[in-house]
Amino acid sequence: MATGKNNHSKYVIALWDIKGFNEGGKAELLAKSIVGFDIQCAKFSPYEDKRILTCGRDNIRYYRVRNGQLRGQSIKLGEHKVFSPGMK
């Protein structure tokens, strides 16, 4: 998995299959998504294949790979959306 910004300042998530890479094979792009959400951290789910969780400024999103596409969904945080030490 790779994340970063493109030349339009949008975040990009790319998921690669690198199974045969060490044996001289090529990495295969499984799915890619361009998102308008800040990404500071991205992790694979330890429980489900092809699921990714991202965290950024004021957002947590989960993604799944299905039919070659990376689809994202926001997690609603309600009253916990913004946290700052000292806030009441």
Image: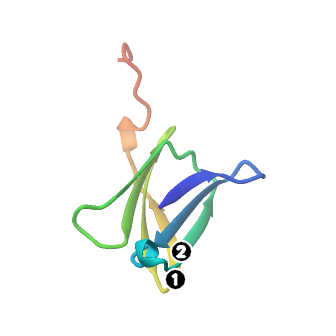
Left/right of residue 5 with respect to residue 28 in the rendered view:
right
Q: How far across and how far down the image is residue 17, in percent?
A: 45, 75
Quarter in which the C terminus is drawn: top left
Q: Position of residue 26 (x, y in %)?
A: 53, 78
Which mark, by number, is residue 68? 1
**Residue 27 position (above or below residue 8):** below
Can you name the residue that lies furthest to the top here? 86
Residue 8 percent across, percent down from the top left:
77, 52
- Residue at 38%, 43% in the rendered image: 78
47 above or below 38?
below
Crowd band around label 1 with a 10 angstrom C-alpha radius: few (<14), some (14–19), many (20+): few
Give me the disc on residue 31. 2
Decide: is 29 above or below 9: below
Q: Amino acid at mark 1?
A: Gly
**Identity of the residue furthest to the front in this view:** 24
Question: Is mark 1 in CB contact (under 8 Å) with mark 2?
Answer: yes
Quarter-wise, where is residue 6 in the image? bottom right
Q: Nearer the viewer, residue 3 or 27?
A: 27
Q: Earlier in the sequence, mark 1 or mark 2?
A: 2
Local secondary structure at mark 2: strand
